[in-house]
Image: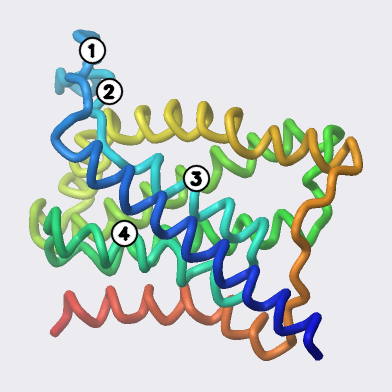
């Protein structure tokens, strides 16, 4: 009993640590990111920067880590807590639920990664593949929300324009998150391969179901928020 309580407290403290680190970094980097490099691309006659820098990678990598190490409730509690804390200081808009649900999905993907025992050297290419796929899923979902929100005409042309305009952010998300995975996830893989003890918290069946349901609920809330 005492051992279980201590293990729960360790999990809680690690979650608080991740929330604190993510919040501090996101606040410190706000308005302090370097300017976008002077590299431009032209797609369908639209010329724009190759990269548009933002703070996505900070919350994205912590979402994946919380899913991999903590799992369960913390898969979505950690990233959403970071977003709520920092949004109160930095600000956000109606698309908040789309970004929050996007990060909850990333956390769930991290949790699934751990469950499938893919955190080994053998599966490093798969980890990067899943990471890239996660980013694409996030950008498809959040930009779909931007399109629904009325920033673009509700036509196929408007949807296409929305995604074209989002490409600089997507390219930056892919680059920054790939670097972050290299710096954070790969060391975890290395430690596991060398039998270094990585926290392993048991997830109860009810908690597992809530973990899967939470992103779905946030997605529904985001869609309802636009309708209402």
Is 171 left or right of 111, judged from the image as shown?
left
Residue assigned mark 2: 51
Q: Nearer the viewer, residue 85 or 148?
A: 85
- Confirm or deny contact between disc 4 and disc 2 (CB under 8 A): no
Instruction: Tell me the crowding category of disc 4: few under 14, some 14 to 19, or many 20 or more residues within 10 angstroms, Cα based.
Output: many
- Quick one: SS at disc 4? helix
- Cα–Cα span, label 4 and label 2: 19 Å
Corner quadrant of residue 116: bottom right
- x, y (%) of residue 148? 19, 63
Q: Nearer the viewer's eye, disc 3 or disc 2?
A: 3
Residue in view at x 46 percent, y 72 percent: 77
Residue assigned mark 4: 99
- Cα–Cα span, label 1 and label 4: 25 Å
Is 209 left or right of 2, judged from the image as shown?
left
Corner quadrant of residue 223: bottom left
Among the two numbered marks 1 and 3 on one chain, the one whose residue lies closer to the N terminus: 1
- Quick one: SS at disc 3? helix
- Cα–Cα span, label 4 and label 3: 14 Å
Residue positioned most to the right: 195
- Confirm or deny contact between disc 1 and disc 2 (CB under 8 A): yes
Measured along the vertical axis of the image, is residue 8 above or below residue 105? below
- Quick one: SS at disc 2? loop
Instruction: Tell me the crowding category of disc 3: few under 14, some 14 to 19, or many 20 or more residues within 10 angstroms, Cα based.
Output: many
Q: Quadrant of the N terminus?
A: bottom right
- x, y (%) of residue 83? 30, 61
**Residue 37 marker:** 1
- Quick one: SS at disc 1? loop
Residue assigned mark 3: 61
Among the two numbered marks 1 and 4 on one chain, the one whose residue lies closer to the N terminus: 1
């Amino acid at each position: 009993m005492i051992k279980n309580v201590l293990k729960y407290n360790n999990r809680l403290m690690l979650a608080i640590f991740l929330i604190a680190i993510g919040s501090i970094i996101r606040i410190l980097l706000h308005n302090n990111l370097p300017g976008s490099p002077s590299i431009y691309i032209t797609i369908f006659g639209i010329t724009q920067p190759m990269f548009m820098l933002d703070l996505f990678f900070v919350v994205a990598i912590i979402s994946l880590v919380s899913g991999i190490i903590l799992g369960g409730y913390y898969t979505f509690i950690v990233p959403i807590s970071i977003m709520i804390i920092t949004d109160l200081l930095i600000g956000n808009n109606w698309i908040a639920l789309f970004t929050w649900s996007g990060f909850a999905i990333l956390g769930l993907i991290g949790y699934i990664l751990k469950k499938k025992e893919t955190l080994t050297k053998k599966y490093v290419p798969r980890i990067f593949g899943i990471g890239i796929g996660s980013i694409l899923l996030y950008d498809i979902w959040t930009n779909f929300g931007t399109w629904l929100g009325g920033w673009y005409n509700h036509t196929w042309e408007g949807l296409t324009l929305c995604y074209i305009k989002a490409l600089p952010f997507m390219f930056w998300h892919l680059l920054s998150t790939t670097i972050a995975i290299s710096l954070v996830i790969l060391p975890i893989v290395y430690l596991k391969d060398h039998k270094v003890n990585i926290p392993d918290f048991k997830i109860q069946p009810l908690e597992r179901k809530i973990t899967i349901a939470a992103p779905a609920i946030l997605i529904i809330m985001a869609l309802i928020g636009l309708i209402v």
